[in-house]
Image (cartoon, coloured by chain):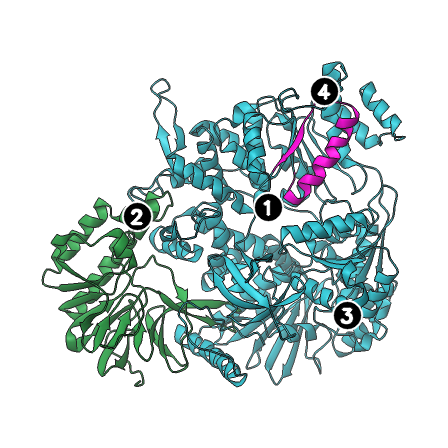
Amino acid sequence: MHKALADWFGKRGWSPFEYQRECIESYRAGRSGLVHAPTGTGKTLAVWLGPIDEYLHESGNTPHNTPAKRESAAPIRVLWITPLRALATDTVESLIEPVRDLNLPWTIEQRTGDTAASLKAKQRRQLPTALVTTPESLSLMLSYPDARSLLSTLRCIIIDEWHELLSTKRGVQTELALARLRAWNPGVRTWGLSATLGNLDEARDVLLGSGPARTDAPTITAKLPKQIHIETVLPEDVQRFPWAGHLGTNLLNPVLEAIDNAQSTLLFTNTRSQTEIWYRAIALSKPEHIAQIALHHGSLDREVRNRVEDRLREGSLRCVVCTSSLDLGVDFTPVDQVIQVGSPKGIARLLQRAGRSGHQPGVTSRVLCIPAHAFELIEFAAARRAMQARTVETRSPLSKPLDVLTQHLVTVAAGGGFEARQLYEEVRTTHAFRALSITEFRWALDFTVRGGSALGAYPQYHRLARAHDAEQPGEERYTIASDKLARHHRLAIGTIISDLAMTVRSMSGKVFGSIEESFIARLASGDRFVFAGKVLELVRVKDMTAFVRLATRRSGIVPRWQGGRTPLSTLLSDGVRTLLEEARLGTYTEPELECIRPILELQSRWSVIPAPDELLIEHTSTRHGRHTFLFPFEGRHVHEGLGLLLAHRIARTRAVSLSITVNDYGIELRSPAPLDVSEDEWRSFLSTADLLPDLLSCLNHSELARRRFRDIARIAGLIHPGYPGRSGKTNRHLQASSELFFDVFAEFDPANLLLDQARREVLEDQMEVSRLRYALEKITRSRITQIPPPHLTPLGFPLWAESLRTQHVSSETWRDRIGRMVMQLERTADREQRSGRNTTSHPARKRTLHDRG
Amino acid sequence: MDGTQRAILHGSALCTIAGESLTLLPQRAIWWESASTLLLADLHLGKAAAFRTAGIPVPENTTTHDLATLSELLDRTLARRLVILGDFFHARSGRSAHIESTLDAWRSRHGNLEILLIRGNHDHSSGDPPAHLDINCLAEGASLPPFALHHHPTTDASGYVLAGHIHPAIRLDDPGTRASIRFPCFWFGTNGAVLPAFGRFTGMKVVSPRRDDAVFVIAENEVVRIGY
């Protein structure tokens, strides 16, 4: 370490941690790598001081007494990529500190979607010494022809919170950008920062790709065990505690007490709608503290969120109710308590949230867990056990998302063009596309050059054009077909991140935030919903804005969270099974298990607690029909796939109409008549033979793939971005929905690989097909126990309760299906009529026919 | 409004409006047999081509497919007149040479057919069809008793309005699959009706009929009346 840097540590009375020293030295040795350290242990400095140290060595430490101006500052050396643009400002502030203290002639600036156009223009002439940016803004930079010369002095790229990007398409976008930067500057070093993951080395390999950066690259882990204390609020009378549900405000009183006993509390819930519910519940019970209680979630207006974050930092808030929007990065030192409402469904998530309190080295992080229903007690206990055993989930990197590749091809073409063979080799250095075949690459290229591989299928279409260079006849060079297309493309680049969001705005123009278009589409004028802690009434929808007014009636409909519920992680469900096995054998060591003991004993009495190598199937009759419950304990996604698969296979052997309901523990199949399936037959329904073809044919019967196409169409540039600030009218004749694209491709270009990708994404993400296969293999080795319990059991009841939201599989015709839907519609209409609701007709008005029950 | 009865054309439904018996076809058109007239709205020819010109890849054949469907209907009904309730072309940029030559061929196949086009909003910006196609272009409000022909839904004292423009659809919730699905529909109100868009590559807009309106959705290849 350079002497000036060592002095800097000395002056502040610090000495660098061993892992920080290791980072600085590895950097100095020219290596790339991944750093893993708990939050609040100085990992930002660990990677930031490397480049500073290098500069000090090179410049001979000539002192500078004036702060650097753009023109006299050192040219760009470091790109700092952060997944959240909200973190950019904080990051710049913490990076400036040592630079200022050491009087380095460095400038540090950010460039994100929020950056002023004037600053961006200056940056286009000369970049600062260090630039803090997002994956989208980096991609955007690469779409300008002068990017290469602007970045020619780059030494180091740092990717913050890499674990957040790792298994996302934005992560793949980052991988592709990194490959480009490395191709331009082969000596550039890449450093990633990551929270705890079960597959850190894989995370590092994904980040570094297969190029020279990979050589000798270390994973550096801080040996600074963070003390985390996990405690669960136990209901006083578990017999009266619900067996199912997710609202969980029955434990409001202990929560209020805990808030009173702490300086500043972050209360995490799993969904945005729960955030609204808890915020209202706390605000109603504590009207005197209303000014010190705030709400924070991803749909709120950025300014509102900034205000909340500022006040958190100052320590002037007692409690903030939030979702994962506050999971990341920002250091809120005054926060001394974290409350988790509902199961976190994964260990990494709970650790991340716990780390939001006690955000300094050496301070214990505390998290208080609030179960929403009885079985979450087990999940909290399992999470604590896993934490003590230091096990944590892995995140799998994505493979070959062709929509992202398509976008990248156009980006690179706009940024000065490419030679096809060279770009293929470059793309293959990324982890995501390491197995990309030349055929797939050719397809993506053809898709952007002439639409499809079939000649004549896409007349007049060009996004890329082949450039003819008389001097390089052997080359196959492509550039963007027109400047206009380049401008469109730049508008579209940012769209990997944002879902189609509608602005929620009052009639007088005040912006409350944004909400998914799919949610608003289900509302009619006059419908009420809770948003930003207020009850709002929808007035009308125009372009991408939902106009609202404050509702006069107090009751509201809570927005139903559209994003799928996170499934219980494999690790946590294994933990749950271990605890259940202990309970089955009569051992109750964890307080949560002791608390739920009466319920588990009831389960044993009426049925059994299944052993780890046992698949329990319960058969019960109620007035709603015959219920068959299976309990594989594999998480909601796997059960969803498994449920569809079972129904599909059962329907092949007998005429039956089945409803499917799933949760994290099991599957319910409901039928009008008894199912009567022998054990041998169950074994064949649950076999891995023909798994993929069977799942694919389930897919064709459902809307899943079609809905999945939404993202893909946007990323691949099918959805015209429109122009911000201009009326939506300009390009209305070029707007079409992703569903329409899906249908048109399916009918007129069925070989389009983007359709394939949609199916693959459903299989991999939504049904977790590899986990599903593993689950089936496990069942093959298990014994099957079929029991007809006298009542709905504690395990079966939550499934029964949830069966209002069910999947349905049968061999009905369209006519029957419509008949059924119309009955539903009529019930809704009758209800509206009874409630005297105004149902005048207006063609421009959307209306919901959805049963909100 | 009379009840629905199954009609001869496969998958179609019958309904009586303003004293006329109309056959609603799953190909998104109306066969008015007593006038030997086929009615449809919102053809949007060349829409895919307009997208492609703007650098958005949409496969070809949507236009040829639409014209082929139309030919098939004309052959099957032996219609003497075709009424298009607006939006013949989608955009000027979509009027490619390929589209125009396909149209020429299509027109010569139906040489004796009388064609009326009520000019819609897209027709104003993309221009009338070429004169040699012999398509009679009219302003909204043309009369074909007992009907008044429009593009935009409206009321008209001179007759029961037939219109397009909206691309109406009904959203139905399937309690079984938890999903809601949109179906294109024919929507008959007291003073007028809105036809679904005929073009294959066109969007839809969810509408909210009154209780006493008659709505027929098109599901797969079948027209089904739904009650309000």
In the rendered structure, find residue A168 and report the number of the disc placed on it.
1
Q: How far across and down, in percent of the image, does residue A492 sit?
A: 48, 44
Q: Secondary structure at mark 3?
A: loop
Q: Secondary structure at mark 4?
A: helix
Dot 1, crowdedness within 10 Å: few (<14), some or many (≥20)?
A: some
Alpha-carbon distance for marks 1 and 4? 34 Å
Q: How far across and down, in percent of the image, does residue A419 sit?
A: 43, 27
Alpha-carbon distance for marks 2 and 4? 56 Å
Q: Magenta stretch containing residue A232, yes or no? A: no
Q: Please give the count of numbered marks on the rendered protein.
A: 4
Q: Decide: marks 1, 2 in contact (CB < 8 A)? A: no
In the rendered structure, find residue A440 and report the number of the disc placed on it.
none
In the rendered structure, find residue A55 and report the number of the disc placed on it.
4
Q: Decide: marks 2, 3 in contact (CB < 8 A)? A: no
- Indicate the amino acid at tag 3: Ala
- Indicate the amino acid at tag 2: Ala
Give the colour chain A carries in the figure: cyan
Could you tell which of marks 3 and 1 lies nearer the N-terminus? 1
Q: Is residue A84 visible?
A: no
Residue picked out by circle 2: B49
- Indicate the amino acid at tag 4: Tyr
Q: Quadrant of residue A81?
A: top right
Image point (17%, 64%), residue name: B116
